[in-house]
Amino acid sequence: MPFIPHTDEEITQMLERIGVDSVDDLFDEIPVHLRAGVLDAVPAGMNEMEISRLMRQRASENTTATCFLGAGAYEHHIPAAVWEITTRGEFYSAYTPYQAEASQGTLQLTYEYQSMMTALTAMDVSNASMYDGASSLAEAILMAVRANRKSKSRKILMPTTVNPVYRKTAHTIVKGQQIELVEVSYDQAAGTVSLEQLKQAQQQQGGDITAVVLQQPNFFGCLEDVDAITDWAQENKILLIAVINPLTMAVLSPPGNWGTGSGADIACGDGQPLGAPMSAGGPYYGLLCCKQALVRQMPGRIVGRTVDLDGKEGFVLTLQAREQHIRRSKATSNICTNQGLVVTASTIYMSIQGAQGLENTAAACFENNNKLVAKLSAIDGVNKVFSGTHFHETALQLEKPAAGVLKALMQKGILGGYDLSHDYPELGNAILVCTTEMRSEEDIDAYAKALQEVLNVASLAESA
Amino acid sequence: MLIFEHSSKGRKGAPQSPATKASVSAIPENLLRKQSAALPEVSELQAVRHFTRLSQKNFSIDTEFYPLGSCTMKYNPRACNTLAMLPGFLNAHPLTPDEQNQGFLACMYELQEMLCEATGMAAFSLAPMAGAQGEFAGVAMIEAYHKARGDDARKEILVPDAAHGTNPATAVMCGFTVKEIPTLDNGDVDLDALTEAVGPQTAGLMLTNPSTLGVFERNIEAIAKVVHEAGGLLYYDGANLNAILGKIRPGDMGFDVIHSNLHKTFSTPHGGGGPGSGAVGVADRLKEFLPLPVVDKVDDGYRYLTAEDRPQSIGRLSAFMGNPGVLLRAYIYMRFLGREGMVRVAEFATLNANYMMAEAKRRGFTLAIDNRRASHEFIITLKNEARDYHVSAMDFAKRLLDLGYHAPTTYFPLLVPECLLIEPTESEAKEALDGFMDALEQIKHEAETNPELLHAAPQTLPVKRLDEVRAAKKLDLAFAR
Amino acid sequence: MSEVPSELKYTESHEWLRLEDDGLVTVGVTDHAQALLGDLVFVELPEAGTEFVAGDECCVVESVKAASDVYMPISGEIVEINEALADEPEIINSSPYDSGWLFKVKPSANELADLMDADAYQAEIDE
């Protein structure tokens, strides 16, 4: 009986107290003809020794390779202390901190997280997290529509330099609300969306735009002209939603500082680079920050600092009247559970790293990418797709089909990047390569050597 | 003391990151950050000590009995954590080609299959990252189903008034209007009112069974018939699946769509608020609409289905695969239980709840619904104590904290005044249940003789009652630097 | 016991109305409603100049544990809002019928007579 502590004697005593003869009697309100039979398709139970063997086997069936793939998830070093502390039972097995006095650990930590995230993004307010970057973009859009009451169009300008899978997710989540996501193309030389293109889209859509989304660094790793676009949005009463990689904000101008005015209105993104392992896709967390004026449109939990009866500092969930458990059908969102444990890890990660640690890490990502791109683009038939500065991801043009090249690289133990040809057919055989601080000179050399060899194989086009 | 207050300028805790900062001067000046972020500057030891101490200010399952109704705070086996964090899983990039990700995909495929069997549904998607997202996916599938049939007039979702707040919030997010259906005093849905309410505008009914009132909905077959005959679909909110796991399956009750909170029934950790997982299951006719990704088995291998495979899918809900780390923990837990263990979950969760309910009655508490079986949870109403001694359910809750027990859920469901919703789960031993009931009885006695003790509780925790009005009025949401 | 001034009109959703000498109608929430909500922490007021039809949601009053919509009791245009509530929403708790008023409406139809008087409202809340 896994994880059930009852002795036979106790079972008898308990049944007696209830006044029934058997445990089965407790289910006598369930119609007999509806009851389940044996769950044949569920295997028999195992003990820990057997499960350990099974899971180690499964884990070993996942082939490891040197990772040059990013596209929304990044392999960074996570100090050992981070998950050691995070998985302490007191964090791991606690519930949402509804009983504040018995949850000061989680609550204070969340307040510290909010403080760190607002510091990093230069925004006024952060919530306690959303599910992931993609769904936090969807919530940012819903929030912008609620907040921008002057705008009636419910139209959102969505440059295609925003992560394609974020755009798809946002579409799934907002489509029930009569919100239109208007795709705006990018400058094919620069790999960024130009102000002219945004202005043109605004005109084509009749002028009234509720919000514009801008990703920095964008999906191609290119740096958008955030200042000019933010100023334009503000002049036109369009809310600006920033999608950011929070680690890069240690080095790059944060959304709260964009433009000459008050910066982005809402910032969202994925917190994964700050202490969450890649873990096949999660759990990560979505960060969501905003300007003070929008705080009541913010979905999800928010922790506030207050005092107790004796005037002693303490922390509580606040602004709860926005949330589904009180506001029901009129809530800002249906979100309830968030990604608290990953936020715990991220808060510890940011504390250990400090601003200097984050800056060094981000700068190393940038430097390694320059090294990699220099080496790869020196190979015949490999060229940078876009001019301009890239952060830690770069699009490279190949002369051979990307899928075949990546597959061949994989056989050499290299996860070579993201095949751009599905989402961006106009780029032809292009891949997106990524480096983090984890990639050594040797790794980079190994990639260059492998790519050279792969491209030299004449039969590649057929095999792809 | 905040971590920021441990900070000393120039102190570095980060020998784990690159020791020096590479040049970023190739980046245009206006795109660079002007001033370093005001993060704490502490040593690794200071950080470890600070966060360890913070953890000690939490109640948790690992440290206290946590009978929080509707939340299923059962033991989270340590092996589930250890094995889900094996490097082969942790180091897998989410876009790793399927061929190199077979170990993980095999677990996910088998998890889908086990969930189908345990719930009686035809197919599952593991994509939703929490119960509320599972609900969103479920209602979006209902919408897509009607639309695909050209049945565009179905704009209304029915929700019992006892439902979780996420139900109506979700329906509105999906573009529906919401109509509440009343509940009878015995806890069953008012079938007459339901019959009255359905019509060509009905898209579906969202139902939790056993309900949030802690009883099994006995008229489930009649309800299913009414909704289906009106052309609507039946949605199962899996919040209380723990009560019936292996005893009766939602699919057999007539449900078309369900979500299962894996962080409840399948024991993945609550983590102080998440991450969760709200896997969704459907009857055969809704299979094509499942959110992506879904894992399929082809010959000897496993692969993610894409939008090309499932053009009618409601789409993606996250960038990658929901919350894989949570899914792995649920998978491991289910392999621990096996088919025979699953049934025992429901049996012992129900035994514990009914035992506590009998004890509550014996000790003079008023039950919200008397003379019925409890599911895996039950409700005490303290309306008499509130009337006679001017103590509230909140006072009881806070006093319980003093006595070393996490409080049950208070003030939910909204239908029952001054309520405590108590869910012991199967993993608690009889001593814990008795200890809790002793504490509750003691508090009842204190309410009669010394109510001040309740009003002033808690006294033994890191803080006393907190000023929530001040928190909401004078918003302090981040440390001012 | 909640206070129910006899000279005012009332709605089932707990708004009160006072016809002023200048023909404008002042609207607030009743003593009974503020007591149910508890300490108010925020009021979201409509903008002056906005026109509403009777029954529209026009305002939200928020306490720690609840947020309650205020419905427009009569059709008309908002001509003035109580700015003081932005910083001190608790005025509604201390003075629901006087300095805790929400907004003033210029009515566009003669709907005031259809609303409840104090006796009817008292009976309503006694139920």
Image: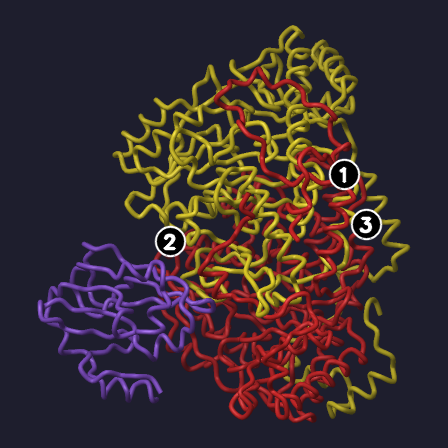
Chain colours: A yellow, B red, C purple
Regarding mark 3 in the picture, which secondary structure is present there?
Answer: helix
In the picture, measured across the screen, residue B406 lies left or right of residue A411, that is: left
Mark 3 and mark 2 on one chain: yes
Is residue B216 in view?
no
The residue under label 2 is B150
Percent of width and height locating residue C79:
17, 59
Q: What's the chain of the residue with tag 1?
A: A
Question: Disc 1 or disc 2, which is closer to the eye?
Answer: 1
Q: Chain of mark 3?
A: B
Q: Amino acid at mark 3?
A: Leu
Place of residue C103 in the rendered image (x, y in percent of width and height, measured from the top left) = 23, 64
Task: Give the residue at mark 3.
Answer: B83
Mark 3: few/some/many CA within 10 Å (<14, 14-19, 20+)? many
Q: Look at mark 1 in the image and give the residue it sits on.
A: A79
| Number of numbered labels in the structure image | 3
Report the residue at 52% width, 57% height from top: B138
Q: Is residue A265 visible?
A: yes
Q: What amino acid type should be assigned to the residue bearing mark 1?
A: Pro
Q: Amino acid at mark 2?
A: Gly
Disc with the residue nearer the chain's start (3 vs 2): 3
